[in-house]
Image (tube, rainbow, N blue to C red):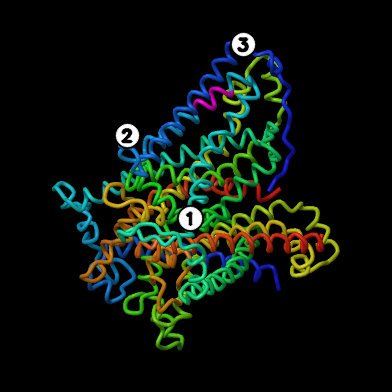
Amino acid sequence: MQQNPAIELPTADAPIGVTAGWRQTLGRVLIVGASLVAIALVAVQVLRTLGWTTLGFQNWRPVAIAYLAWAVCLCASLVLTRGERGERAVFVLPAVLMTLAFIIFPTIYALFIAFHNWNLSATAGREFTGLENFRRLFGDRGFWAAMQNMVYYVAAVLAQYVIAFGLAILLNQQIRGRKFFRVVFLIPFMLSPVAVSFMIGKSLLNSQYGPVVPALEAIGFTGISFYEDPWLARLNIMIMDAWYSIPFMMVLLLAGIQGIPGEVLESAKIDGASSWQTFRHMIFPLMLPVSLTAIVLRVIFELKLIDVVRVVTGGGPGSATDTVSLFIYREGIQKTNVGYATALSQFYLLVIIISIAIVLWLANKAVQKVS
Amino acid sequence: MSHAVQKTGIYAVLILWTFVCLFPIFWTVSTAFKEAKDIYQGDLIPWLQFEPNWKGWESLGLSPDTIRERSGARDQFLKHASNTLTISLSAAALAAVIGSLAAYGLARFSYRFGPWRNKDISFWFLSQLILPPVAIALPILVLYRELDLLDTRVGLILVYTIMNLPIVIWIMRDQFNSIPVELEQAALVDGASIWQAFLRIVVPIAAPGFVAAFILSLVFAWNEYFFAVVLAGADAPTLPLLLAGQTSSQGTRWWSIAALATAAITPLIVIGLIMERHIVKGLTAGAVK
């Protein structure tokens, strides 16, 4: 995460305030006009929804188009009234406006829904129930089983890290065909998790006709089923997940190792350090920041886990492989219990934010201590 | 440990991992050419243990004998494939453009938005990476119902664009930071506007980063399943949906799933083989100083 200070470019344009009068006027008219149209449209739609008027449109789509038009007018007006400062703002505005519309607004709306009992397929509609959803959440065994599984899945990231680190070190050795190995090791990352689920999770690990179970039985394991035994089912998910996630960590760690200056390792060699000592006292500490980035990113992605589990085990047996996302999906989409599911998702988001913040804080302290 | 033993060990592990990476792909592709009896016997090696046949491809209407005939299954497959292509290309292009613009602004100008400075705005964008899709999927589902965007390609394109923005901004900010400011300053002194300087000077130099951001967004959108299953249905379905819906009541038709999976992953394997350098560049952007 680079944190270069923003660089000031010399201002070639005239300073603010000297822009021509007509531009100022046009710019103001544009933004005020666009805002008024957009507000009027929203007001009419709200009144229509409340049943106070029959004016307005069938659905809210015109409001979305009005937002888009308003965004364009805002950019144009900034350029007209503010000159170069406006032009600069236009670089970042599309991303900001889009994020406001698709992340911030839905999140606020979600907070609103979370306090309601609302089933999309029931005719009763929305009903305000206050904290009821959150009270229900604390007694929901299925949800907490899924939360517990997330702990296991996140712990599995450490195993992925160890394997990825090992592979990265090997790829950094003087070897022939490095390019070939690098390309091949990256391929699992590209593949569709749903395809992987079918072909590894359901087919390769299948007890009847997959090659893995017979191979394990040949070396002495008996009665293996990757779907019926809770821990083996979890292992099934973890193997698949590791298979397409390891390349990501490996690539990050390899770049980190390649960034270690050659002299550092040379001097260790001259001092007579063994490979293990070099790793333990030189490479590993130098790699801590990269390792941290890789692990935190992987944990963040791991917490979103859903597709492989849905396809391979559907969360079973019982709720042994269930993930929070899948649980919320079943509650909100399949049972159309939007109110409760949204409350769950907001609670989950809060837990994620708090835990990631704590982890980052602890990790930063640890890194500072070492270096 | 002698040098030779060490070297052998290294190659042994590398080859073992090559096998781990490639065997599932071999399994997928070979299963697409098996029939039921080959699958239930667990046959592995084509020609030696089983005779490859076109059964899986027949069920998609893509085998040599069926390719000339009309086929509902093929139309179905092509509909999903073209949807996936349109949606992922549009979403990747949108995300790469919007994200690059924002990243350039954040790398070069100092913004002030109330108490927020560039660092805070950047963090605000990046922090969206932690947002689990499920947290916004439900409100977006409800909003899309009102906006009449459910089961439309536009709806999915917009969602995939927004999900890719943080990654693009991350990659491109790193890319722009590595370009010396002097180049743009020279252009500005010559009388170019900041937009001209950006388009003529910076964009060509930043092209590799842009390609990396585009490819990663493309891969993400191509494989995305969760939003597709929530927001799309009969009109705007994507390949992961078709694949996930394959378990039928008559038992699993592995040959047809494998053929479908092969068709869905082949473009990505090709991209991976050609674009490895760009993908690695994109993944490591900003993480390694």
Residue B153 seen in the current view = no
Instruction: Quote the CA–CA distance across marks 1 and 2.
Output: 36 Å
Give B83 or B204, whichever is nearer the viewer.
Answer: B83
Q: Residues within 10 Å of mark 3 (few under 14, many from 20)?
A: few
Say what secondary structure mark 1 lies in: helix
Whether residue A65 sits left or right of residue B185 in the image: it is: left
Mark 1 residue type = Pro
- Mark 3 or 2, closer to the camera: 2
Tell if the residue under mark 3 belongs to the same chain as the one under mark 2. yes
Asked if residue B14 is positioned above or below residue B62 in the image, the reply reads: below
Q: Which residue is mark 3?
A: A21
- Residue at x 35% of width, y 57% of height: A125
Amino acid type at mark 2: Leu
The answer to whether dots 1 and 2 both sit on one chain is no
- Range shown magenta: A72-78
- Which quadrant holds the N terminus of chain B? bottom right
Q: Which residue is mark 2?
A: A55
User: What residue did someone put label 1 on?
Assistant: B133
> In this rendering, which labeled residue sits more in front, label 3 or label 1?
3
Chain that bears disc 2: A
- Is residue A74 one of those drawn in magenta? yes
Q: Which secondary structure lies at badge 2?
A: loop
Give me the residue at 61% from left, 69% from top: A158
Above or below A77: residue A194: below
On screen, residue A67 versus residue B209, left or right, reads left
Task: Choose between B127 and B80: the one closer to the eye.
Answer: B127
Residue B82 versus residue A338 in the image, above or below: above
Marks 3 and 1 sit apart, C-alpha to C-alpha, by 47 Å
